[in-house]
Image (spheres, rainbow, N blue to C red):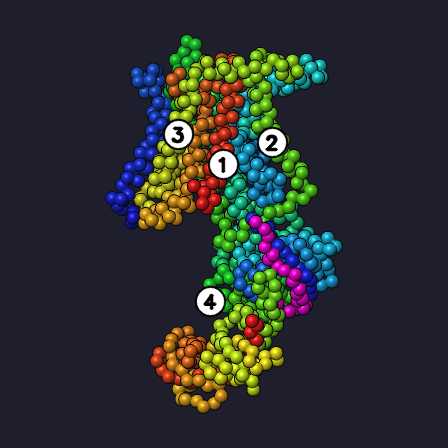
Amino acid sequence: MASQGKVSRALFPVVVVALSGVVLILLPLLATGWISFMVGVPGYGTYTLANYLQVLLDPFGYRVLLNTLLFALGSTAMALVLAAPLAWSVARTDLPYRAAVGFLLGMVLVIPGFLQGMGWALMLSPNIGILNRALIELFGLEEAPVNIYSLSGMTFAQGLSLVPPAFFILSPVFLGMDSSFEEAAFLSGASKLRTFLRVNLPLAAPALVAAAIYVFVLSFALFEVPAVLGFPDRIFVFSTMLYFFVHIQQGTLPEYGLAAAYGSVVMIVSVLMATYYAKLVKQSRRFVTITGKGRRGKTLSLGKWRSLAFSVVSVYFILALVLPMLVLVYYSFLPFFKLPSLDAVSSFTFKNYVNVYTRQGARPLINTGILITLVPMAVVLVAMPISWLVVRSRLRGRFVIDNIAFLPLAVPRIVLSVSLLYIALISRNLIPRVLRRITAPLLKPALFGAWFWIMLLSFREVTMAVMLSSADSIVFPAQIWVLWNRALPHDAAAAAVMLAGIALILMLVTRRLIQRLSTPGGF
Amino acid sequence: MLSIKRLTKQFEVPGGSIRAVRDLDLTVEEGSFFVLLGPSGCGKSTLLRCVAGLEQPEEGEIRLGERLVYSARDNVSVDPEDREVAMVFQTYAVWPHMTVFENVAFPLTEAKKKRFPSAQVAAKVKEALVLVRLSGFERHSAATLSGGQQQRVALARALIREPKLLLMDEPLSNLDAKLREEMRDEIKELTRSLGVTTLHVTHDQIEAMALADLMAVMYDGKILEIGQPEALYRNPGNRSVAEFLGRTNWLSGVVAGNGTVTTEMGLVKCPLPNRAGPGSRASLGIRPEWVELTAEPCQSANSFAGTIEGRMFLGDAVLYWVRVGESRMMVKTTLTEFSIGSRVSVVVPAERWVVFSETA
């Protein structure tokens, strides 16, 4: 075993894999820094500070910065205001259908945000939005009452889709909270409201702030919704501006250098916030003591608030999932735009679904299949040795490795923590039999959970797919993006419905597997 | 002060329900220190939490003084914050985001009823901290305190409102042995001088006997026996109670008449229960410290020849295992001179035996 800073021979492969993982993470980030000092065609560029000068001086950049801040702050606030009470109610109260809430939030997470963006565009675009048109006809209005192609529209749609990540960060915090803290307050004579304000809330505060920072960093870099809802009226945030820079406009070269310069700035800010986030998480663990006695937090009765809470939850899911998906389904069956009517329903056709296939064949689906098979393997293989080194070894510099692994928030923390646990247990029981008999069965659910989770996340990954894919390597989500941008909303809707359908199936299979694996005797 | 009638509390578990408290009656007198003793899972903590209002029973009623705080029949269930009882938790439940002062002052400043002016709060907190010997810790963050100090804060917080009833849920079980004894003695001293009615839950029989004015031994959701610690220890009503309160040597035999029982050790003279006629089977129990050892052979009744088989030094006493005929006896004594293999006489005073009829 590695102790006192020495690396034993047995550890060597672990270190090699971990270090190559670190290199793989660092490489693109370092490359970004390098490119930011270049101008011209990639490979033939010259070194310059011009990019940073432009970042400093261009008023357009500052306008985008302001947009991004408003967008990120707004959607983070919205996500947290919804997710915190939701996570608390699911963890600690008798809210009806709690298990379904978790599953539906998983669906919202897995369905790419730009599908929701498309749904909202089709409902509330000023020209063709179904809801807008209906409102105009109903009240005899001059123009569309709501324009989703606006900063507030973007913020609204994004806020809805950021609820799941905030929820999944907060719910273990509320689950782990020692309920004797609040019971002690009750028995001191404090009312439920006062207990919440003086005990529950301050205890959860570090975790809430941490979740807010996490979601903020996330929303700062989000691309999908701003792309769908921002491009039509040319409202840019950082991510869409970068996309704009590197995609060839008419008569200009892609400006990699400028994009990289902006990217570096964002990266530095993100890393600073991420560091602060990590610090807060540590602090919040100190507060939220998970007691050894294992008395689970008592389920609080919502009483007369139960139906109100349930209505709020329902409205959220209607806005985040049901309405956007419904409108996409409706669009996917229409030959051309019609307002919902009997006539519209009678004209329903499968033509759009056939089109999705005839346009590009099975290539996008096959590519997606390959992607979701390989990515989890790679992530688990790289993340496990890294986690192991950080938690169990005494290798000097292991904290540096940890921080590097944290750099791309793209590596979901849930995966890291699951593999941390896996490694922590494994390394304690190096005796193979113990491993096979006890540890592996204990960890199978966690490991498989992580595996399927990454699979789902790679399935829904749009941003990188859109940025990186070519005609040959196109994956399914990127295809939808292409169809949408070619102004083929009906084909795009058909593809989107298929994507959502596959996501649903994958989610159900995953849940089934995890349940089977978690019950003794399963598998 | 506290009266519980026919209380039943069950928990739903996969595949059925567990009755944690079964049809239980209990009365605690004003100003007395009452201890519920029992193994983990016997329902003692659940009972305490029902009194606090943290658990909702299914049947029965609970009264605090004249006030009905729970009744299944009349559909009464007073919220915990309105019951005017205080509680000390096993996990201390001292709020880590507050100072010691804020923790202790909380019941005065945040309670629904009886808010106090701040000058009075400061004086009362000071007084409470003197009681639990934490003067000068007011500004310390509660998160930085040791386990023992946190428990003192929890105690001060519970006492500051001068509760009608103080509930303690295994408050000492997370402390190390030495600290546990110190805190135990302080709790006894404190509650006696304040005269607060206390209901205390523990699985530690020594703690229970040391603290209790009156105690109840609980098993499987029911109370086996209630009594004063000494009476229960000397004269337990049944074998389970005897076993909960300390180690016991058990013999089994047949009543021979004339106040004697024939056992594998020989003829034993002991007080017999009324119903035990000659020929019936009986269990005889005796605690290790009531058995005497002598080196000389002894001719008196209830003395038996034996050999030392095991020896364990405990500091203030020595525990011997003595072979007597077919059986083996544990003997606890201050005599240290015997070693393994020594031949001894075991003398068992007749009045020290507890005897139960064995029912077939």
Mark 2 to mark 3 CA distance (whole Å): 32 Å
Q: CA distance from mark 1 to mark 2?
A: 22 Å
Residue at image x 56%, y 43%?
A91
Between B13 and A213, the residue placed more toward the observer is B13
Q: Specify the segment rendered in magenta.
A: B15-36
Name the chain letter of the residue that bears numbered label 1: A
Say few, some or many: other residues with alpha carbon within 10 Å of mark 4 (under 14 / 14 to 19 / 20 or more): few
Please determine if labels 3 and 4 lie on a single subunit.
no
Q: Residue A281: percent from the left, percent from the top?
A: 47, 42
* CB-based contact (under 8 Å), mark 1 and mark 4: no
Instruction: Kindly indicate whether the residue at mark 2 contacts the one at mark 4 (C-beta within 8 angstroms).
Output: no
**How far is disc 1 from disc 3 in space, using C-alphas?**
18 Å
Q: Which mark is residue B178?
A: 4
Label 1 to label 4: alpha-carbon separation: 50 Å
Q: Which mark is residue A373?
A: 3
Front-most of residues B130 and B276: B276
Name the residue beneath numbered marker 1: A511
Q: Are marks 4 and 2 on the same chain?
A: no
Q: Residue placed farthest to the top in the image?
A: A251
- The disc, 1 or 3, on the residue closer to the chain's N-terminal end is 3
Q: Residue B43: x and y, percent?
A: 58, 60
Q: Image quarter for residue A15?
A: top left
User: Is A509 within the magenta?
Assistant: no
Query: Which chain contains the residue that carries disc 3?
Result: A
| N-term-proximal mark, 1 vs 2 | 2
Q: Badge 2 sits on which subunit?
A: A
Residue at 45% from the left image edge and 30% from the top image edge = A457
Mark number, residue A316: 2
